[in-house]
Image (cartoon, rainbow, N blue to C red):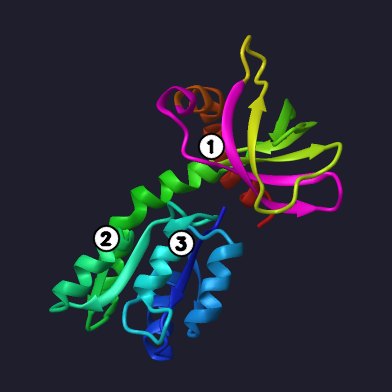
Amino acid sequence: MTTRALIVDDEPAIAELIQAVLQTADIRADVETNSGKAGQLLAKEKFDVIFLDVNMPSPDGIELARQARAGGFNQSTPLVVITGMDDLTLQKRAFEAGANFFLFKPIDRQRVLRVVRSTQAAVQHERRRFQRVAISYKVSLAAGEKTIEGKTLDVSLGGLQAEAKGVFPKGTVVAVFLHLGTAAPLRVRGTVMRVIGETQMGIQFAKLDPVDSERLQEFLLPHILKQLDEEPRKEKQFK
């Protein structure tokens, strides 16, 4: 699974420099120079790591960081904020908005590579969280007085894809009862992030409490690690 980055900077030369360096590290990097369009991307697509320039027309990098952290696919994606070394006030604001790492100007190859190395552990953790495992288990989804029964198409530590007898509208907050073959179902809350036709929904889990998180990890991690281990072998077969 290729690592995917998003670079948001209204200076094309800087964005392209970062993109070129990331590509040498086998990271696929998309560039967006329009911060408004970048906000739309963050709302509908999942990235493994995001680079945000602070000084852009509204929404600037800090605003985009807040949008990402407010919810959706990139709520916990590692965020790298691009800023000047002497912008201490901006650095504080960026950190408060959810930034994890800083890439200081002037930008050069070594600075970018140092940041990439710093983000690797966080990126791998996030990829494991969103790694989907194709397993089918009974799931019940409830909102208000309505309950929809179905089965999972895939499950990750961050959510699931369900096939059910009906759907809830996108944005609906649902109670999720996930039956994993144990006596008691896993009970969590989530938000409908996508609807496919009249039978499929993508659900993103809200923050799990420690007990539920541990139960889900114990169940999924062996599947996730096996899947990640098998992917390089599959890629070699097609080369």
Quarter of the image for residue 162 reads top right
Q: Which residues are magenta?
A: 186-213
- Mark 1: few/some/many CA within 10 Å (<14, 14-19, 20+): many
Mark 3 and mark 2 in contact? Answer it, CB < 8 Å.
Answer: no
The residue carrying mark 1 is 157
Residue drawn where x is 38% and y is 79% of the image: 60
Q: Amino acid at mark 1?
A: Leu
| Location of residue 123 with respect to 92 vertically, above or below | above
Question: In the rendered structure, does residue 209 fall within the stretch colored magenta?
Answer: yes
Instruction: Tell me the chief SS of the magenta region.
Output: strand
Q: Amino acid at mark 2?
A: Glu
The residue carrying mark 2 is 96
Q: Looking at the picture, tell me which residue is in the foreground, 213 or 131.
A: 213
Residue drawn where x is 27% and y is 81% of the image: 107
Q: Which element is circle 3 on?
A: helix
Q: Earlier in the sequence, mark 1 or mark 3?
A: 3
Residue drawn where x is 13% and y is 79% of the image: 86
Which label is found at residue 16? none
Question: In the rendered structure, does residue 231 fall within the stretch colored magenta?
Answer: no
Q: Which element is circle 1 on?
A: loop
Which label is found at residue 68? 3
Quarter of the image for residue 113 reads bottom left
Mark 1 and mark 2 in contact? Answer it, CB < 8 Å.
Answer: no
Mark 1 or mark 3: which is in front?
A: 3
Give the position of the C terminus as an image quadrant.
bottom right
| Location of residue 187 with respect to 48 vertically, above or below | above
Expressed as whole percent of the image width and height from the top left, the position of residue 79 reads: 37, 62
Q: Amino acid at mark 3?
A: Ala
